[in-house]
Image (cartoon, rainbow, N blue to C red):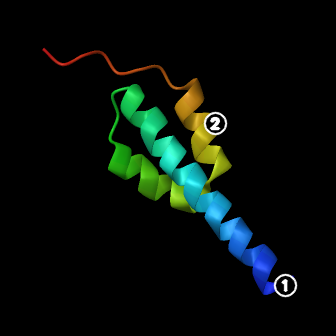
Amino acid sequence: MSVASSGGFAVGWGTLSLINAGLAQGKGRSGLNWWLLSLLLGPIATLLIVVMEPLPPRT
């Protein structure tokens, strides 16, 4: 694997983690926690966020 292709992989993984943080916040969850989890799990975290129900609003 060349250096250029591994750099693109890292950029894509980082972008996915930011998207996941936004998705998590939209469902009432902690964006920071999901961003960190997404750095480790990547697409698996995306799947988890999508299938989980949104949290009920706090009163």
Asked if marks 1 and 2 touch (Cβ < 8 Å), the reply is no
Q: Which residue is mark 2?
A: 47
Where is residue 32 drawn, in percent x and y? Answer: 34, 51
Which circle's residue, 1 or 2, is located before the other in the chain? Answer: 1
Task: Reply above or below: 22 against 4.
Answer: above
User: In the figure, is residue 15 to the left or right of 28?
Assistant: right
Task: Reply above or below: 37 against 59.
Answer: below
User: Which amino acid does the dot numbered 2 rest on?
Assistant: Leu
Q: Which residue is mark 1?
A: 2
User: Which amino acid does the dot numbered 1 rest on?
Assistant: Ser
> Which quadrant holds the N terminus?
bottom right
Residue in front for this viewpoint, 48 or 14: 14
Where is residue 7 drawn, in percent x and y? Answer: 69, 75
> Which quadrant holds the C terminus?
top left
Instruction: Check disc 1: other Cα within 10 Å, few if <14, some if 14-19, many if 20+.
Output: few
Which residue is at a point 18% across and 19% down the rendered structure image?
Answer: 58
- Residue furthest bottom in the image: 3
Where is residue 33 drawn, in percent x and y? Answer: 36, 50
Instruction: Check disc 2: other Cα within 10 Å, few if <14, some if 14-19, many if 20+.
Output: few
- Which SS class for mark 1? loop
